[in-house]
Amino acid sequence: MKRLFLLLAGTALLAACREEEEIIPSTGTVVTPGENAGPIAGFFLLNEGNMGSNKATLDYFDYETGVYTKNIYAERNPGVVKELGDVGNDIQVYGSKLYIVVNCSHFVEVMDARTAKHITQLSIPNCRYIVFKDRHAYISSYAGPVKIDPNARLGYVARVDTADLARPAIDTCVVGYQPEEMVIVGDKLYVANSGGYRVPDYDRTVSVIDLASFKVIQTITVGINLHRLEVDNRGYIYVSSRGDYYGTPSKTYVIDSRTDKVVDELPLLPNSNMTLRGDSLYVYSTEWSYITHRWSISYAILNTLTRKVVTRSFIKDGTEKQIRVPYGIAVHPVTGEILVTDAKDYVTPGTIYCFTPDGKKKWSEVTGDIPAHVAFTREKLEPKK
């Protein structure tokens, strides 16, 4: 089961310098002709790396040159031991900085988005995802050790002042069990609680935090084993439930942020990961069943105005047959090109695919191990010095 694979013991980061010859240099490949992608200069791809292997890596794609460069962090940061650490779980660009959440190494790596140079690390135990508003970063944390435990403690959200990163987290707010993704709507922060460590006694709630008081003001009962959140431009929040891999299937729910109530349940839209562009919600599902011992994989687009599935296969040229384990998804905010990553067997290099808006393969490239999280950037990455 993919989530259990990702929730085993990890290792912590040590402090020492590496020898120069130990650093594996980056490699760049022209994968497509250069083009003008509007205000988007490129994107970073975070490869999670197999848990316990300390192999999280960072890639970069430049739209102007069409060059895809693998493993840029190591050679740009030779003084950082063990490089990015164990299991890169989220990546975001905010302001001039790039933030990477490293789950099993228990920190958030902060670097300059133009150079990918290390600035600092924020110590957050078992950290998962990060979102931002104004000068603050909000980071979800399982709070306890990385292990399955029916008595695992409640998780929390840490608040960090991005204008003063030398300070530790300035506040924490306790939420549900094993909190995952978050979204901010107005002055409220929504947190999906999974309860994954307490299997089979999963959590089924979304915590609502008032940002002014930084306290939970409501707990919404949704569905079991929650994970992903996306909010559309009308304030409706889409929530993924992974189910229990037995008799309860994966579903997608809809919360109205004006009333903080579940207003729709989409049982025919299984959901492993999703991303929004305009009124289209792109969803892929890799649903495992311990009853049938089979995977069910789909690539759907939901119209958020009608909440109807437009297609269950947004890849139109047969390339989906080459993708063994879809693991990440992103859509270019300007061009509408679709990025899908393939984790393959979780222990060898994966692949990233770029599709045109009409679902035809444009290019693909080999990545690091378990390619998972994409962050678009408006700042062109400077050449290494």
Image (cartoon, grey):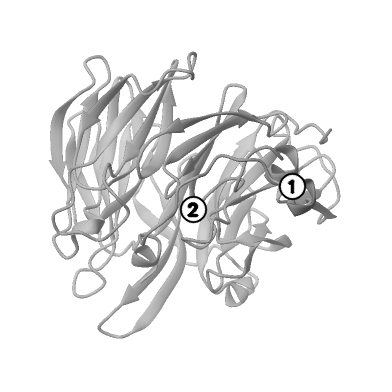
Residue occupying image coordinates x 82% and y 39%? 64
132 shown above or below 50: above
Count neighbours of disc 2 (C-alpha within 10 A) and say few if under 14, some if 14 to 19, many if 20 or more.
many
Q: Position of residue 189 (x, y in %)?
A: 29, 29
Cα separation, mark 2 vs mark 1, equals 23 Å
For label 1, the residue is 19
Residue 277 shows in this picture: no
Q: Is residue 156 rendered to the left or right of residue 29?
A: left
Residue linked to disc 2 = 87
Q: Amino acid at mark 1?
A: Glu
Q: Nearer the viewer, residue 277 or 188?
A: 188
Q: Position of residue 33 (x, y in %)?
A: 86, 50
**Residue 76 picture location, percent across and down:** 74, 38
Name the amino acid type tagged 2.
Val
Residue 303 at x, y percent in the picture? 42, 49
Give the number of the disc on residue 310: none
N-terminal of the pair, mark 2 or mark 1, is: 1
Foreground: 167 or 312? 167
- Of tags 2 and 1, which is closer to the observer? 1
In the image, residue 301 above or below residue 254: below
Residue 131 visible somewhere in the drawing = yes
What element does badge 1 sit on?
A: loop
Using the rendered view, name the quadrant where residue 29 is placed.
Answer: bottom right
Which quadrant of the rendered structure holds the N terminus?
Answer: bottom left
For the image shown, how many numbered marks are present on the structure?
A: 2
Q: Is residue 192 left or right of residue 365?
A: left
Q: Label 1: how many residues lie within 10 Å, few (<14), some (14-19) or many (20+)?
A: few
